[in-house]
Structures are given as structure tokens and as C-alpha cells.
Amino acid sequence: MKKISYLDKLTVFSIVLIPIFSSYKSIIPKIDLGMFIFLVVLFFNILKLKSSKKNFFYGNIIWIIYITYIIFSIVISSIFNFSNFGFNFFRFFKHILIINVLIYYTNNKRFNFNYAIKIYCKVAVFASLFIYLQTILFYFFNIKLAGYFPNLIMYPSYASRISTIGNHMFRPTSIFFEPAHFIEFVILSLIFYLFYFEKGIIKIFIAFFITSGIFLSTSGQGMIIATFIWMIWICRTLKKKRKREILNVILISILGIILMYFLFKSENGRLALERIFSSSGNHAAAGRIQGYIVFKNLSLPEKIFGIGYGNVPNMFFTSLIFNLICIGYVGTFIYFLLYLIFFKYSKKFFLKLIVVINFILSVSSTAFMGVTLLFYFMFIVSGIIHYKDINKNKLTIKY
């Protein structure tokens, strides 16, 4: 196996850990710690390597089309004086930068796919272990253990609205700022342990361990997506009709039923379900619907072309509604096309599943924005290129 250079390792760490560090301040105003580390590592990568056209991955063309339309939407919005909620140039620039670096890194194979999965899964297991620790300390010793440093948070005003206790329920966040960030990070590890690594009961139990952590976070979308992933695994395993694997399914199903029984029997479980389905303005579903009201009130030309990337009111938007408002029907069509193209290019089932999960999270959360976009699509695009190279060179790799 080819030795991994220190710069390659730093590149992997700068991307795998960016969802964690992006909550913190850096020494430069308006640039979070995760982005600061990422830019420093990027600088050294640029010094070492110049982009080469011969390595260009043609699937990345859709990113160039997407970026071009983002710029076009801002021009159109300015010419026709579309609604102005306050254009955020920094947000626009960060989005463009992240996509360009994604193209640069994947074209030049700067993200070591196998090594990245190895490091990422270790961090995901640690994050899950930490959420168990928070839960045990709270319920047995009434101790609220924060997994982040409040004084170093990038946006203090946002921090004041987030606490471990919310809506009269305990919501552990692990080493993240809030449960949603924990879910967006660890859910990939569930896919890797069930569909990427070599089959084995240990890997399955690690996946169940991570799933239990997701349920302990009381994140509704996390519970739903984790259950969805397990159902796919069960269906695919039963289809193989192998006795040992069927026994694994039976064992995991029993453990899953026990987990759900105790969770939803508890007060926290009941409140978690209430957050998902309640129509109250303070609950999860209502928080995701309010963005569609903003879009509904736009004029027809604004709905078609968008009002410019980052030109939105100061409120929560999912990635889908954010794109609808900013780049309209035309830009959102490119957004859907992007998912279809990467789904088609993904030759491995687990990569296709990552594309699907990211799309679901982009509808319910912010998985197609900022560092989360970079984190997911670095794995997706690098994985596509990795297996493309294996097929091209007719190599056989054992995992």
C-alpha cells in the first residue's frame, strides 16, 4: 500500500473535522476555526500541486453550471430589482469557494478516500460514545456535560438559543453544538459500517451502537433516517438468504425493538415525537415549513430566476427552500440534476445511499450548505473517482 504523505493526512483531517471545528471562532473575524484550518491546508496543497486538465472528472461539470447560475441569479436580481432581504456577500463567497475547492481536490485526488473513512469512523464512534456519557451523567447524577466550549462559539447570539435542555426535554449534543449537527455528521458512519466495511457481527454492533446514540440525541430526523438505513440493510441481507446473516438480522431487530420500546415509553421519547409532528411554531416541522411561506410570497419572476444567493431573511431555511428562494425554479432544477448525476455516477451501493441521504437531509436540514456540503460531497465525488480508477486499472482491493 502506498504510504500516505503528511499533507494528505492533514487534508483528510481538515475536511473530516470541519463540521466540528466550524462552530468555533478563529483568530480571523468572520472566519470560523474549521474554515481557517481548511484554508491553511488548502494553501499548502496549492503550493505543492497545480491543477491538471487531464485529471478532470467530467461529473464536476455540473458544479460549474451550478456556480455559473448562482452568479447569473445575482445579476438578474440586481437588474430587475427583485426583493432584497439583505445580500450576504460572505455567505455567497464561502459557498463558491467550497465548491471550487471540492472540484480542485477531487480532480487532483487530494482526498484519500480509504484513509478518510478510517479516520472519520473513529471520530464518529467517539462522538457516539460521548453522547452516552452525557446521557448517563444527566440521568444518574443530574450533571449536564457540554461537549463544546460555549465561550469560543462563533455566533454567541445563536448559542444563547441553543442549550442542552430544550422544550422541557434533555437533548444531548455530543461534541457538537446541537443534535442536528451530530446527526448530519455521524449518519454517514452508519452507512459505512453496514455497507462499506467487510461484513461481521462486530461492525453490525458498532452500527447499532451509533444508532442508539442517534436515538439518545432525540433528533426526529436522525431517528427516521437511521431507521430507513437499517430497513434497507435488512431487506438487502434477507435477499441474500444466508443463514448467518439472517440470524444477525433477527438479533438486531430484537435489539431495535427493545431500544424503541424503552425510548418511546420515556417522557423524552414522547416529546421527541411531539417535536416532529406538532404544528406549534416552536417545533421541528413548523420550523422547516416557514421558509416555504417566504417563497410563496415572491413574485412569479422571482420564483423562476431566484432573488440572488444569500439574499434571504434572517431565519432558518432548509437547503431546498434556500435554493428555491435564492436561485428559483431554474437553479433548483440544476440542484436536482446535480443529485441525479452523482447518483448515476456512483457505481457502489453505499455511495448511492450517501447521495440519497444527503438529499433527504437537504430537504429537512442544511446538508447542501457550507461545510456540510463539502463534507458529504468530498466523500461522494472522491468515492466515485476512487472506484472509477480501480475499474480502469483492473485492481482488486480487499477491505
Image: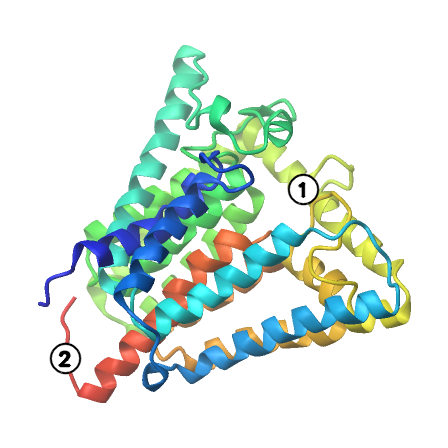
Residue 297: image location, x then y, percent = 89, 58
Asked which quadrant contains residue 301, the reply is: bottom right
Q: Which mark is residue 284?
A: 1
Asked which quadrant contains residue 132, the reply is: top left
- Mark 1 and mark 2: span between their CA atoms? 46 Å
Residue 335: image location, x then y, percent = 62, 71
Q: Are marks 1 and 2 in contact (CB under 8 Å)?
A: no
User: Where does the C terminus fall, quadrant-wise?
Assistant: bottom left
Task: Say whether residue 158 is left or right of residue 36.
Answer: right
Q: Which mark is residue 396?
A: 2
User: Where does the N terminus fall, quadrant-wise?
Assistant: bottom left
Give, as a three-letter code, the residue at label 2.
Thr
Instruction: Residue lying at the far front in this picture: please name it.
Output: 47
Instruction: Residue lying at the far top in this picture: please name it.
Output: 141
Q: In the rendered view, would you say 73 is above or below 197?
A: below
Task: Say whether residue 115 is left or right of residue 306.
Answer: left
Neighbours of disc 1 within 10 Å: few (<14), some (14-19), many (20+): many
Regarding residue 258, the answer to whether it shows in the image is no
Q: Which mark is residue 171?
A: none
Give, as a three-letter code, the residue at label 1.
Ala
